[in-house]
Amino acid sequence: MKTSMKKELRLLKGNEAIAEAAIRAGADAYFGYPITPQSEVLEYLMLEKPEERTGMVVLQAESELAAINMVFGAASAGRRVITSSSSPGISLFQECISYIAGAELPCVIVNVVRGGPGLGTIQPSQADYFQATKGGGHGDYNLLVLAPASVQEMSDFVPLGFELAFRYRNPVMILTDGLIGQMMEKVELFEPIARATEFDQSWVATGKTADRERNIITSLDLDPAMMEQHNKDLQEKYRKMQSEVRFEEMECADAEYLMVAYGSSARICQKAVQLARSRGIKAGLLRPVTLYPFPSGKVLEMAGRVKGILSVEMNTGQMVEDVRLAVNGKVPVEHYGRFGGMVHSPNEVLEALHEKIIKS
Amino acid sequence: MDVKEISITDIIRPENQVYRKSPLMTDNVLSYCPGCGHGVVHRLIAEVIEELGIQSETIGIAPVGCSVLAYDFIDVDWLQAPHGRAPAVATGLKRVMPDKYIFTYQGDGDLAAIGTGETIHASNRGENITIIFINNGIYGMTGGQMAPTTIPGMVSSTSPYGRDVSTMGHPIKITELVAQLPGSYYVTRQAVHKPANVRKAKKAIQKAFENQALKKGLSLVEVVSNCNSGWKMTPVKSNQWMEENMFPFYPLGDIKVDGVLVK
C-alpha cells in the first residue's frame, strides 16, 4: 500500500512563521519584548500555548535588556533559546550578545529590521547589515547571519539556525525585515523536532555533579595573555564557520551584469532580472543566504565573468563594501537602494543598473 | 630537662575541631581586601549549599563588581552576568530548570543602580530565585565611587565633599522597595561583622535557599557590609563606622517573612 505524508501547508506572516518554527524546532524557551514590526512573534507564541504543546517556555520581559539576558541564562543550560526584536531593540541586545559570543553560547536572535537611525520608522529596511555582520557590540566577534528571502525561509532558517548555533556554540542571527515579517505567504511546515533531553556536560551550567568539574560560563579573563588566546580561539572558530557559506544564483551562467542582493531586496531583484532579460540585457542575481560568512569566493568568481556589479540594498550602501572587498577592483561595483523605510521597485533597480553600470 | 616536642597532628584532631572550611570553598586565594565582608558571606553560602546537600542542583550568577570572580571561590556551576542583569539571567536559567537552585550574588551598584529594572521586575514576577545583595555603600572594584546606596554626607571619590542629596539624589532603599512587591516572599537585612550577626545571616541565607523549593516567590538577603579600602579606614574602624552610620540608615532585621511584611 502506498502511503503518503500529507504536507502541512499554512498561510502565515513571516513573523508567525518564525514563532511556529520555534515551537516545531524544539525550542526550550523564547524571551522577548514587543516592538513593531515583529510583535506577532510574541503574540503568536502566547496564543499558541507552546507550554502545552511541547513544554517550551515563553516569557515577555520588561525590556530588551532583560530579554537577551534571559536568553543568556537559558542558553547557559544548553537549552535551545530564541528571541526576536527589531532594530532599536537589537541595539539594546548588543551588550549581552557580546557576552554570549564571548562566553560561546548558542542561541538564535531574529532581527526584523526597520528603518533608522534612532527611532527611525516602522517600515522595512536593511540598514542593520553592518551591525549584524561586523559584530555589533564591543570586542572582536562575529555572529553567523542568515538572510531569509521568503516566509518559507523564515520557517526553515529557525531549525537551521539552532543547528548552526550548537555546531559552533555561537549566536546565530536571522536578519530579516519588516517586509518579510509582515507579508503572508504559503509555508510548508517541517515535521516537529523533539526538545533535547540531554545536554553537553562539558560546558553547560546545569549543576555540578560528582562526575564532572564545575562549569563556569564567563566572558571574563583578567590575564591579557589568556584573553588574547581566547580571541585566537574565537577567530579559529570563525575561520571554520566560513565553510557554512550559502548563496543562491539566478541567471548567472551567461550574465554580463550582476546584481547582488539579499532578503527582500533579492525578491525585488528577481523581477528586475526578468525585466532586464525581456529587454535583452543579460542580467543575473547572486543572493547571499549567509551574510556572515559572506560568499566572497562566489562574488570574486562572478567578477571574472561580468562587466559590472550592482549591490542592491535597502540602505545607503553597506553590503557593497563586502562586495567591493571581494571583487578587489576587477570590475566596477556600485550601490543602489532606497532607504529609511522606502522600498525600491524592480523598474528603479533596472534603471539604476543602466545608469550606474551599463552606461558607464 | 626534656622538652616534649608537640606535633601539629597532636592538636588537629576531630575532637578538638571547632571550625572547618567547607569543602565547597575552593582553595583559590580570595581576591577581596583583608577585612572585607565578602569572604564571610561566600563561606556562609558554601556552608548552606553543603548542609542542604544541593551542590549538584545549584547554579550561581556572579555580577560585575568586586565579586565578579565569585565563581573562583564556591565550587558550583556559575555564570558571570553583564552588569546589573543577574536577575534577568537568573530568570532565564530558572524558567528552563524550575527545580534547580539559582542564586545571584550582587553588589549595590550592580543591583540598585544599573540593574534596578531587572531587580524590580524579577522580584515582581515572583521568580523563585535567591538574591544575595552586598551593600557597602560604594563602588569597590572601580575604586570607591559613589553608589546608589552611599548615605547622605558620605565621602567617596565621586562625592569628595560628601554626598549632597540636593544634587546627587538620595540613597535608595531598594530592599524595602522589593519587599513591597507581591512577588517577593522573603526579604531581610543582615550583617556579618560580628559572630552573632554571622550566625543570623547564615540562617537568613539558608531560609532564602530553602524557599526556592516552596516556589512561592523571590528571596532577597541584603548584607550591610564594610569596604575598608573604599572607605579609607582600617577594618576595625570601618566596622565601627558601619554600626554608627550605616545601620541607622539601613536597619538590620527581617522586612518580609513568608510573604508577609513584618516591618
Image (tube, rainbow, N blue to C red):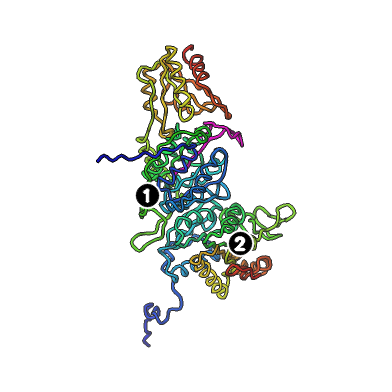
Judging depth in this view, the residue of A178 and B28 nearest the camera is: A178
Q: Quadrant of the N terminus of chain B?
A: bottom left
- Outermost residue to the bottom: B1
**Residue at (37%, 40%) from the top-left corner?**
A236
Q: Position of residue B171 (x, y in %)?
A: 68, 58
**Residue at (51%, 55%) from the top-left corner?**
B91
Q: Position of residue A270 (x, y in %)?
A: 44, 23
- Let me know if residue A27 is in the magenta part: no
Tell me where the magenta segment starts and ends, as one range.
Answer: A108-130
Which chain is home to disc 1?
Answer: A
- Outermost residue to the right: B166
- Residue B182, numbered label: 2
Judging depth in this view, the residue of B36 and A300 nearest the camera is: A300
Judge whether residue B73 can be spotted in this image.
no
- Outermost residue to the front: A1
Establish if B169 lies above or below A17: below
Q: Position of residue B131 (x, y in %)?
A: 54, 61
Query: Which quadrant of the figure has residue A278?
Result: top left
